[in-house]
Image (spheres, grey):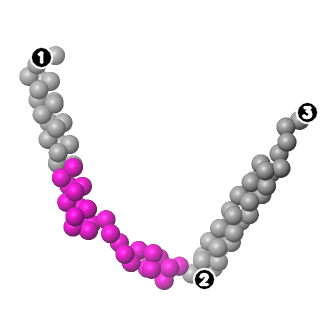
Amino acid sequence: MSSWVIAMMLGASLALGAFGLWALLWGVRTGQFEDKNKFLDGALQDSEEALQDAVMLEDKKKKIIKEKREKEKNYRPPD
């Protein structure tokens, strides 16, 4: 490959990378990634059954983790 092709590819890569970094910083500065009402809107639109299911699944997850820790705590290797 000739050197001018490598230089063009390197230049294009640097230009695209700089543009991506600029776009990210612009988005952070202007608050494009902040959605303060996301969770509130989600809670308002969820049905009561969906919320109860979420609570039940979270409780089940905590119970499984607790049981796993108890098993690991009481584990003794065979003699």
Kindly identify which residue carries mark 3: 79
| First in sequence: mark 3 vs mark 2 | 2
Residue lying at 14% horizontally and 24% vertically, measured from the top left: 6
Circle 2: element type? helix
Q: Quarter-wise, where is residue 2 in the image?
A: top left
* Secondary structure character of the magenta stretch overall: helix
Distance from disc 1 to disc 2, alpha carbons, whole Å, reads 66 Å
Q: Amino acid at mark 1?
A: Ser
Is 45 covered by the magenta stretch? yes
Kindly identify which residue carries mark 1: 2
Position of the C terminus, as image quadrant, is top right
Position of residue 22 relative to residue 61, above or below, is above
Disc 1 crowd, CA 10 A, few/some/many (<14, 14-19, 20+): few
Any part of residue 74 in sight: yes
> Residue 30: x, y in percent?
21, 67
| First in sequence: mark 1 vs mark 3 | 1
* 65 to the left or right of 75: left
Q: Amino acid at mark 3?
A: Asp
Q: Magenta residues?
A: 21-46
Query: What is the number of the mark on residue 48?
Result: 2
Would you say the residues marked 1 and 2 are in contact, meaning their CB atoms lie under 8 Å apart? no
Residue lying at 20% horizontally and 43% vertically, measured from the top left: 17
| First in sequence: mark 1 vs mark 2 | 1
Q: Quarter-wise, where is residue 1 in the image?
A: top left
Position of residue 26 relative to residue 75, above or below, is below
